[in-house]
Amino acid sequence: MPRESQSSRAARVRTILDLLNRVYPDAYCELDHTDPLELLIATILSAQCTDKQVNIVTRDLFPKYRTAADYANADPAELENDLRRIGLFRSKARNIRACCAKLVALHGGRVPGSMEALIALDGVGRKTANVVLGNAFGLCEGIVVDTHVARLSQRLGFTRETTPEKIERALMRLVPRDQWTILSHWLIWHGRRRCSARKPDCANCELKTHCPAADR
């Protein structure tokens, strides 16, 4: 994309955020959950897996395992079988049991509401912690960078960075803090509904006038 001044990019980003808000006013986390523990488990399961597939599995999983202790004390083979439809189910089952054992031992079985405590849990990195903090606790500590957010951040010219950590830092400098959580929902929804990886629908895209990658 052509070189763009910092002030011009900031103004363009604000315009895009306003458009995303208008197009997706009801955007939300599409992982089904009713409490922080369910969201934590669902987010761990969502790595390299679609939200739709995770929701199919958790429909039966959540009624069976209601507490962190239930997961921590689960028979390993049985939990693996419960997660069999999920990619990497063996390692995810192992991480979930270890994660929930720490929840029981260190946090009374409750999901902690801080980045430091969350990333100390097995199977939990910044992305998962940001999902839980933003959607279960309403805390904007960072920005979730999944494949959709990474792809659209580059296509929209928000940043040229390519790693999740650097993309997150770049977005945090560009976007007001109170929009950090909703930003990821907007970009994920737009990525799924309009700006797909292989065939972006540029012709009908609501952002095309402000997108340097748009096929006009």
Image: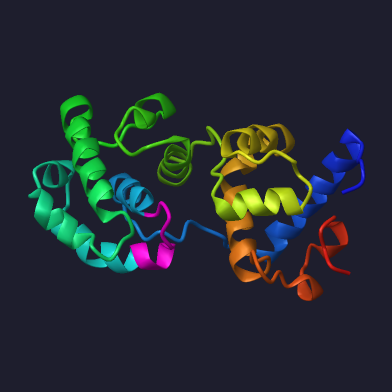
Nearer the observer, 188 or 134? 188
Query: Can residue 25 be seen from the camera position used here?
Result: no
**Image quarter of the C terminus:** bottom right
**Residue depicted at x 37% and y 61%:** 32
Instruction: State the extent of the magenta-drawn residues as a range.
Output: 46-54
Rendered position, 181 above or below 53 = above
Q: Where is residue 92 in the image (x, y as percent from the top left)?
A: 28, 48
Residue 40: which quarter of the image?
top left
**Residue depicted at x 85% and y 57%:** 210
Rendered position, 160 above or below 112 = below
Residue 33: which quarter of the image?
bottom left
Rendered position, 166 above or below 79 = above
Q: Position of residue 126 (x, y in %)?
A: 47, 35
Nearer the observer, 187 or 34? 187
Side of 130 relative to 18 (left or right): left
The count of marks equals: 0
Q: Where is residue 8 in the image (x, y as percent from the top left)?
A: 91, 41
Residue 101: which quarter of the image?
top left
